[in-house]
Amino acid sequence: MEKPLYTVTSTPHIHSTDTIDKTMRYVLLALVPATIAGVVFFGLRALMIILISIAAAIIFEVLFQKTAKRPVTVSDGSAAVTGLLLGLVLPPAVPLWFPIVGAFVAIIVVKQLFGGLGQNFLNPALAARAVLMAAYALPMTAGFFEPQGLYNWTDIDVVASPTPLAIIGSEGFYPAAADFVAAFVGNISGSIGETSVIALLIGAAFLFYKKVISWHIPICFIASAGVFVFIFNPNMLALYHLITGGLMLGAFFMATDYPTSPMTPMGKVVFGIGCGILTGIIRLFGGFPEGVAYAILLMNLTVPLIDRYVRPRVLGTKRRGA
Amino acid sequence: MSLIKAVKRFKKGVLDENPIFSQAVALCPVLAVTTSITNGIGLGLATLAVLTASCLVVCALRRFIPTQVRIPCFIVISATFTTIVRLLMEAFLPSLNEALGIFIPLIVANCIVLARMESFAAKQPPVMVLFDSAGMGLGFTGALAIIGVVREILGLGTMFGITVMPEAFPRATIMIMPAGGFFALGFIIAGLSAFKKRRA
């Protein structure tokens, strides 16, 4: 039989080579510097928490999909990303079963019960952190310590030390006490993966380069948080706020999560500014020293609304009022 | 014959048409008071008493209540019994009464009570009504007790106020907060419907 000259197919003809696996692998790669920084500063215990978190997330995903007789999609790496992010947002001295409870909330409650990948209405890792915070407030707030070096396997109460934001929250701000270099490198008290700004920026640059994330959400998020803090504290505090706490990790890796962020560039700008202002409000006026997680979770809930109001104009239709 | 039917009705109220787990009605008091088993059972039994008594009265008066104003009549009847129950609890169970607070007076507007009066008691003979309201009331009490057990054990590590979990067991404060009520209820309903699906 003669080979046909043309293969006739319907549109689309241009296929993107982006797949879920690939995107997830990029995100995992981009998180490697922050993970390494976390382990270097907070020791093998931090590595243990991260590994348990990833393992638990993967196991819960497989267990649920097997039990519910759904196709097992754990090899797409999304569970591993959730597990890694969960490990990175936990304080380094929490008990080792914390990531297991957290992974249960993230994977089973937030992700799978709502339909699995792409159906979650909240960021799973942050939702898990919020639940852990509500359930076990004491270990979550007392689980921070000053960086102790790689081979540290310390107990919680020996060196417990509040985060810079907690100190600002309770004692006010002393510009002299703010060590910008330490905060930039990550040599400060904080959650495992959030302290090293430089490592997070390297990861973020990689994601930008691979076009996994666009600039809208992170830049609007960070800028609006900075402007908000600056309005109420017109001094160095505004800058220090940007490089401490979970702002960098949240802005680049959490707020940009596809299912829980708007689809259009305009929507992303609105989303990012909303996150930034909420973060500023919670940090300066709220009961908690840190507000990135809650800001992102709250804005997650507004995503369907944002998407509804910032629909792009269909090509060829009239502009409103034109 | 009618007794078999009545017993079936009773079983339906407790299991198949359980007001919480199957119908998912009256959730507000459920989520509010099930922070402990004692509170759950207390509200359940109070509701059971009001439900049975007012359904029987509605049943007895069903030919005299004008259709147009039946809802106000139902409310007056259930308010009467709620007041009686509240006064009795104030006198004999003051601590439980204090723990349940506003949710005892609110039994007046409990939708299980109203629904049973409207859809069953006003149309059926007294024996059936008795078994129906007893089944619904006990189903409600049982559901409250089950949610109470889950929340009290996970949130406080106690049962009926007695410590049952070792000190090392971490108390998940969220379980005795309102959000924990939703978690417990959701997981129990999910488990039950999975179980039913498997059996069917």
Image (tube, coloured by chain):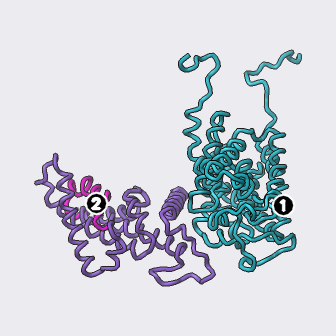
Chain colours: A cyan, B purple
Question: What residue is drawn where x is 53% and y is 56%?
Answer: B197
Residue A265 in magenta stretch: no
State the mark number for residue A37.
1
Q: Is residue A34 above or below residue A8?
A: below
Residue A199 on image: x %, y %: 83, 54
Q: Which residues are magenta?
A: B103-128
Residue at the left extreme, as displayed: B64
Dot label at residue A293: none
- Please state if B55 lies on the left or on the right of A27 as rendered: left
Q: Amino acid at mark 1?
A: Ala
| Quarter of the rendering occupied by the N terminus of chain A | top right
Residue plotted at (28% across, 65% down):
B105
Q: Amino acid at mark 2?
A: Val
- As rendered, which of A75 and A140 lies closer to the eye? A140
Task: Please tell me whether mark 1 sits on a helix, a strand or a loop.
Answer: helix
- Label 2, on which residue? B113
Any part of residue B109 in sight? yes
- Give residue A302's position: percent from left, percent from top: 56, 44
Disc 1 and disc 2 in contact, CB within 8 angstroms: no
How far is the residue under mark 1 from the one under mark 2? Answer: 60 Å
| Residue B125 colored in magenta in the image | yes
Q: Label 2 marks which chain's residue?
A: B
Which secondary structure type mostly characterizes the magenta part of the structure?
A: helix
Q: Residue furthest right?
A: A2
Q: Position of residue A293 (x, y in %)?
A: 64, 55
Residue B142 position in % (x across, y down): 40, 70
